Image (tube, rainbow, N blue to C red):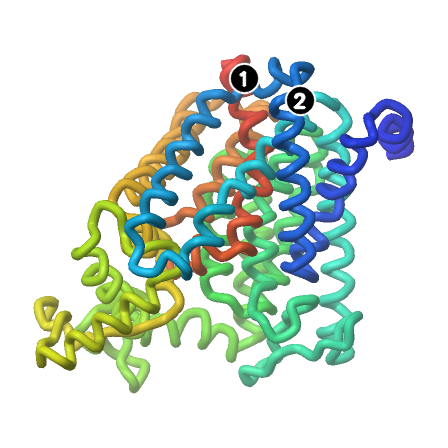
């Protein structure tokens, strides 16, 4: 670590020092302050624009010109939806300044390519951040308050939230950074102790009581078992830990398993038989999903504009009442129009807000990444670079997984969580292609 720090002090420009410092603290800022994380990432993006047009860096950025084109197309789709949106004012800020997230990715890519030690800096950042998070969770679990004095939520079992206070983001935060951390661990050949990391992450996700986060962890676990050399021991230890925690905490088992099966419709209110009608996660989620489909019909190509789902839904409700019609009667599932800030599904949100072009763009990207991992599995050449690339792909897969409830795709915190690992993906994508 001291050598990396010495190199950072003596062999980097003032601008790059500032950029590296921002990236080092980004995980902590995402944990504690969305305002500060968004602010510093915006500053980071502005500096990246300057570096992009510098003659000295043309070779670095020319290697990813294909992906620069891809993002430019997606950004143009968002801008197109802005001009055809039902409320330009609501959509403007989120749409016009969306490019700052990709600037974060290409800025991180630039630093990785330029400085061999920079991936080590990211490792130290994530390592110290995870240590702090684990320590804070232990304090909150034992004493009933964390380092900031925040108590856990009660539901009725205490739900750990750590630095997020009354927001249930802890599980999502950990599980979204987990594949990124694993990718760096394998790239640096530090994967000897990754079993302990899996157990620590699972315990945090379990105590955070977020069902989607738990599902994504199990998805990561499943894909990890497929590439591990010591599958049997790893599987036995992790699965035993999972089952043990569920066994000793019946209330969380009921929430994760029984309550979910009830919402889906596999169990009815008596908890012991089928209700006869299967739902997409729950009636509320299904209402939102079907509402999004109805909303998208009028502006199928361009959508209603970013962050206009709630407005479009309210207008639909007014029109439904005025004309005495039921838009959802065609589905014959006793659904109702449901209005929220977003439809709680990434793909339905994209379809309803930026239209079919955006939907197909993200779906095709997800399919490409998914089959990239399938190809790695079939090749079976599980060297450290391949597995590191595999895990960065897996991070994208869990962020864009189609069949589960999700946060708002255009929310700044979720966008930062998604684009932060993408710089490493850009680098490993090129490196993996060179050696295969």
Q: Quadrant of residue 291?
A: bottom left
Write the residue at 65% across / 35% down.
184
Callout 1 touching callout 2 (CB < 8 Å): yes
> Residue 375 placed where, x, y %?
39, 26
Disc on the earlier residue, 1 or 2: 1
Whole-Å distance between the Cαs marked 1 and 2?
10 Å
In the rendered image, residue 207, in percent from the top left (x then y), is placed at: 60, 69
Horizontally, residue 315 falls left or right of residue 167, namely: left
Q: Nearer the viewer, residue 103 or 87?
A: 87
Where is residue 436 shown, x and y percent of the image? 49, 14
Left or right for 219, reference 283? right
Quadrant location of the N terminus? Answer: top right
Q: Residue at x 44, y 22 (%)?
A: 66
Which sits in the foreground, 417 or 279? 417
Residue for point 66% across, 77% down: 152
Q: Residues within 10 Å of mark 2 (few under 14, many from 20)?
A: some
In terms of secondary structure, where does tag 1 sit? loop
Residue carrying label 2:
113
**According to the image, label 1 marks what residue?**
63
Q: Nearer the viewer, residue 182 or 55?
A: 55
Q: Is residue 233 above or below residue 61?
A: below
Element assignment for label 2: helix
Image height of 421 relative to 277, above or below: above
Label annotation for residue 48: none
């Amino acid at each position: 670590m001291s050598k990396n720090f010495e190199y950072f002090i003596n062999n980097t420009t003032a601008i790059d020092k500032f950029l590296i410092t921002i990236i080092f603290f980004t995980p902590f800022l995402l944990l504690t302050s969305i305002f500060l994380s968004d602010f510093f990432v915006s500053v980071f993006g502005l500096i990246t624009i300057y570096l992009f047009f510098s003659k000295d860096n043309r070779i670095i950025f020319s290697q990813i010109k294909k992906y620069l084109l891809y993002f430019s197309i997606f950004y143009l789709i968002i801008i197109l939806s802005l001009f055809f949106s039902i409320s330009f004012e609501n959509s403007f800020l989120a749409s016009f300044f969306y490019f700052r997230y990709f600037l974060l990715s290409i800025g991180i890519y630039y630093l990785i390519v330029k400085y061999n030690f920079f991936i080590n800096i990211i490792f130290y950042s994530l390592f110290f951040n995870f240590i702090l998070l684990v320590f804070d969770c232990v304090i909150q679990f034992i004493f009933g308050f964390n380092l900031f004095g925040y108590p856990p939520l009660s539901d009725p079992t205490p739900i750990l939230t750590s630095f997020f206070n009354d927001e249930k983001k802890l599980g999502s935060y950990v599980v979204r950074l987990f594949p990124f951390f694993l990718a760096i661990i394998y790239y640096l050949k530090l994967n000897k102790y990754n079993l302990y990391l899996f157990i620590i992450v699972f315990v945090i996700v379990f105590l955070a009581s977020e069902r989607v986060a738990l599902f994504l962890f199990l998805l990561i676990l499943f894909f990890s078992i497929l590439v591990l050399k010591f599958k049997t021991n790893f599987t036995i230890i992790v699965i035993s830990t999972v089952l043990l925690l569920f066994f000793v905490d019946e209330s969380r088992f009921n929430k994760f398993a029984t309550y979910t099966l009830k919402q889906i419709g596999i169990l009815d209110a008596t908890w012991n038989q089928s209700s006869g009608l299967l739902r997409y996660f729950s009636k509320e989620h299904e209402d939102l999903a079907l509402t999004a489909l109805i909303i998208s019909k009028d502006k199928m190509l361009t959508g209603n504009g970013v962050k206009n789902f709630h407005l479009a839904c309210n207008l639909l409700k007014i029109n439904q009442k005025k004309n005495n019609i039921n838009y959802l009667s065609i589905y014959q599932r006793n659904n109702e129009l449901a209005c929220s800030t977003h439809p709680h599904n990434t793909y339905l949100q994209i379809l309803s807000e930026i239209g079919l072009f955006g939907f197909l763009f993200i779906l095709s990207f997800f399919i490409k990444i998914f089959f990239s991992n399938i190809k790695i599995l079939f090749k079976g050449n599980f060297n450290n670079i391949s597995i590191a690339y595999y895990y960065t792909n897996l991070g994208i897969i869990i962020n864009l997984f189609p069949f589960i409830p999700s946060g708002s795709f255009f929310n700044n915190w979720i966008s930062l969580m998604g684009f932060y690992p993408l710089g490493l993906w850009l680098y490993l994508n090129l490196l993996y292609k060179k050696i295969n």
